[in-house]
Image (spheres, rainbow, N blue to C red):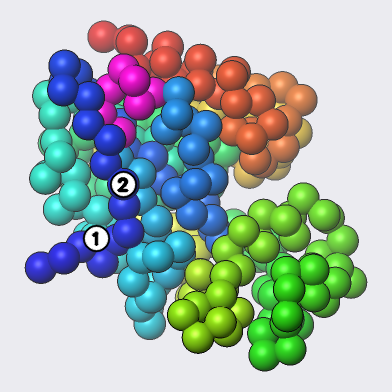
Amino acid sequence: MPSPLNYSYFEKNDSEVLLVVIHGLFGTMDNLSVVRRHFVDSMNVLTIDLLDHGESKHIDNFSLDACVDALLPLIQQYKKSKVAIVGHSLGGKVAMRFALRYPDELDSLIVADIAPVTYKPRHDDIFKGLNSVDLGAVSKRSDADSAMTPLIPEAGVRQFLLKSLYQNEQKNWQWRFNLAGLEANYQEIIGWQTIDAVFDKPTLFIKAGNSDYIDMNMQGTIADYFPKARAHVIEGVGHWLHSEKPDAFNRIIEKQLARP
C-alpha cells in the first residue's frame, strides 16, 4: 500500500544515520530545506509533508497520532542503525508523539520551538485571511496576497502561506494544505493528549529567543516526558528560527547528533 505521505528520501550509502525532518503548520517539506541541504551529504535524510499538507493525503480527522501512524512505516522502511527526528512547531509535536509511542524506533529527538502542552488559539486571523481568498476569482498570486493583507498584515507570513497556493491541472487555484480540515481539527493541532510514556534518550529542545512557544512553566512537563532533555536558545530569532538563523540552527543539530 502506498504511503499517505508525500516524502523524499536522500540516501548516503556510507552513513548509518537516518535524519527525519518534519515541518510545521501550513508548511511543506521545503520549509526545512536548509536542514536537508546541510545534512544530505553526510547522512541519509527523509523529509515529509505532514498529512493535510503539501502533496500528502487529505484526511477528515487530522491528529498528531494519525501523523505518527503514517510516519511509522516510512521510518521502518528506511531505518538505519541510528535514527533521529528534527521537528519544528507542529512537526515537533508529531516528533514528540512518535518518540513517546515508539521509543525503540528512535535514538535522538530534536524539537524546535514547541512543547508537549496545549496552547491557546493563535491562528484565528490566519484562518480568516485564508478563507477570505476567493480562489475562483484569483488570476495570480498577488490577488490572494491582496485579499489576505487586511487580516494578515505581516508580509512574511503571507509569503509563507502563498508558497502553498498552486494551479491544478485544470488551471484552478488551490491551497496545497487542507484548509477546511485543519480548521475543523484545530483543537487537535494546538492540543496535547496526555500519554503514559517516557522517551529516555537524548532529546534537545531548541527555543527561539523572541518566541513564547516555550516558557519556564513548561519545563516540568517536558522533563516528565523527556528526562534526558536539554535546551538551547537561539537569541534574536522568532518562531521560524531555522529560517532566520539557519547556520546556527544546523550547528546545534550537528552537535546534538554527535553526542554519544
Q: Inspect this view and state whether residue 193 appears.
A: no
Is the residue marked by circle 2 packed among few (<14), some (14-19), or many (20+) residues within 10 Å? few
Magenta stretch, residue numbers:
39-45
Q: Height in image: 119 above or below 240?
A: below
Q: Inspect this view and state whether residue 126 appears.
A: yes
Dot 2 amino acid type: Ser
Camera-side residue: 124 or 178?
A: 178
SS of the residue under disc 2: strand
Would you identify the image quadrant in which residue 194 lies?
bottom left
| Quarter of the rendering occupied by the C terminus | top left
| Residue drawn at x 66%, y 25% as measured from the top left | 245
Q: Height in image: 149 above or below 233?
A: below
Instruction: Identify the residue under disc 2.
Output: 8
Is the residue marked by circle 1 packed among few (<14), some (14-19), or many (20+) residues within 10 Å? some
Task: Return the disc, 1 or 2, that comes first in the chain's sequence.
Answer: 2
Q: Which mark is residue 70?
A: 1
